[in-house]
Amino acid sequence: MKKLSKLATLALVTVGLAIGLVAILTLFGNNVRRLFGASADGLAGADSAVAFSKHGGLKAKTLKNFGQNDEGEESYAAPTPRTVTQAAPVAATAQAQPSAPPEPVTSGNTHVTERPNPFTLTTEDRFSTFAVDVDTASYALFRRYVTEGGVPPRESVRIEEWVNYFRYRDPAPEQGDFRVTLEGAPSPFTRGRHIVKVGLQGRTLAKSQRKPTHLVFLVDTSGSMNSQDKLPLAQKAMKLMVDGLNASDTVALVTYAGSVRDVLPPTPASQRDTLFAAIDALTSGGGTAMGDGLELAYRHAAKKASSKAVSRVVVLTDGDTNLGYHQSAEAMLANVQGFVQEGVTLSTIGLGMGNYRDDLMEKLANKGNGNCFYIDSEREARRVFQERLAGTLEVIAQDVKVQVEFDPKAVRGYRLLGYENRAIADRDFRNDKVDAGEIGAGHTVTALYEVELAGEGAQVATVRVRAKRPGGVEAAEQSFSLPKSELHASLKDASADLRFATAVAGTADILRGAPQTNDWSLATAEALAEGSVDGMSDRAEFLGLLRLVRERQASSVAGGTPY
């Protein structure tokens, strides 16, 4: 009996100890398991996430360094910061429903770096082929950076958009859609080299000559547009554009934020009060479903697309996008490509700073048969939407390609200043299926080459231009020649247009850090610009901005800070 009593007592003690141990583990189990690296939170994924390395393997990263990359890894955008309750599974089951891509974070302005064109020997490649570009956003961004006390990031500088911002006195075409002029003179930057200017001047259109126009304003009303230089400036810009339309032209209004909204159906421009009231009523707030908004705007525009009318989508945004399935430029354009082929054109209007997606805006315009502008002030809005409205709206020549053939007997080598992201394979010059650039009414397109002459040969270059009529399938080709005898013996003998364009291109090339400009000087560019203002206010403004940049450069050097 005693023995049984002792066994019962021992059993009771064992059960009590077991119950106590369970209680302790229940209350303090996380701390015990954390000691051995197996906390419940850790197993659930609350403190870690999984990222793919560039080699396709999986690599665990803590949330503290999720937005960082180890050396040698491809960069990627971190997801929008949010409270993590549970990590997503690494692999979805077959029954899992598809979800939207993660929302990217835009931190600061986003640009794309382009490697400057190299100096090319004509014995290796005598052809230079590119698509025309009439965008001007890069120069307007430069102006804003400088007026706000800074300098532009190197990757934001696109030479062709600086040069093409300005008006030149190229003669108007006597017949056809555009005229080409060629001019060359010794380079002010590199001894022994010349600058050759290729200029295309498009024919102008009077307001009464313009085709019937249907515009679809696609306005970003997300929370990121809540500043005076964004939505309020966009509203002023739209009103200026409406005032420049013919009475029979029509305007529709679509907005996007967390969702897409049809604000106004196609409305005649003559109903100014109705249009202005709808524009004034816009407010900002919510996420940014840009891709969804673009699709709806294109659907509306396609309804009125024809060869006898202009049907254009005008996007006004800071370019930020973080909702929906179509967030990249490629995804957005793939979604609306059918409408582009139907003849719908595009204008991307950039606004604001801090999270501006310059890369997205330019890519959309380049691939969407459009143009890209950056609006930094009401004055710039007036310039784009009133003074140059015909060029902004109406295309007079599409898929315009330029091919310059240098004679190896006359030219040892050359370098095209800018147009890096508009390059076309030489073999595709006469391939009319290859997309190129558009020229609007009254637009001027200018390209500059730095060339090194050889001792022989009478002809510097032959310039060929191919272009289609709007809506056309086959392109027509024109050819122009530049004899060596027509080169100016001195830069002083060159036109003010060539001298000023050279000053602008030289400044841009220096500021973007092109390796070929190591011994170039902004002082040379300033002197050149000063002597070629030619009474034009926009040129005078450039000269003032250049002087500010030089002052900051001098202060930076004096203070021991790299410029």
Image (cartoon, helix red, strand yellow):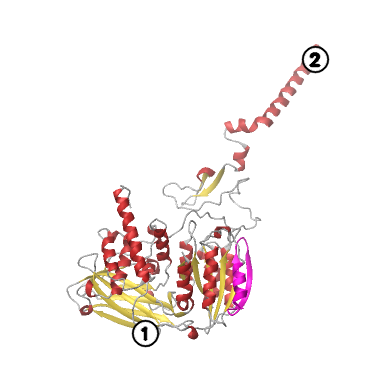
Residue 158 drawn at (x, y percent): 38, 65
The residue stretch that appears in magenta: 253-280
Count residues near mark 1 (Cα–Cα under 10 Å), then give few for <14, some for 14-19, many for 20+: some
Identify the residue at horizontal 47%, vertical 83% (top origin): 472
Element under disc 1 = loop
Placement of 535 over or under 518, stated as above or below: below
List the residue tagged with mark 2. Answer: 5
Identify the residue at horizontal 27%, vertical 58% (top origin): 518
Identify the residue at horizontal 62%, vertical 71% (top origin): 277
Residue 198 in view (yes/no) = yes
Count residues near mark 2 (Cα–Cα under 10 Å), then give few for <14, some for 14-19, many for 20+: few
Q: Earlier in the sequence, mark 1 or mark 2?
A: 2
> Alpha-carbon distance for marks 1 and 2?
118 Å
Identify the residue at horizontal 44%, vertical 50% (top origin): 73
Residue sitting nearer the eye, 395 or 437: 395
In the visual, does 262 lie left or right of 72? right
* Residue 406 lies in the magenta-colored region: no
In the visual, does 519 lie left or right of 280? left
Residue 517 drawn at (x, y percent): 28, 60
Amino acid at the residue labelled 1 = Pro
Residue 62 in view (yes/no) = no
List the residue tagged with mark 1. Answer: 173
Residue extending farthest to the right is 1
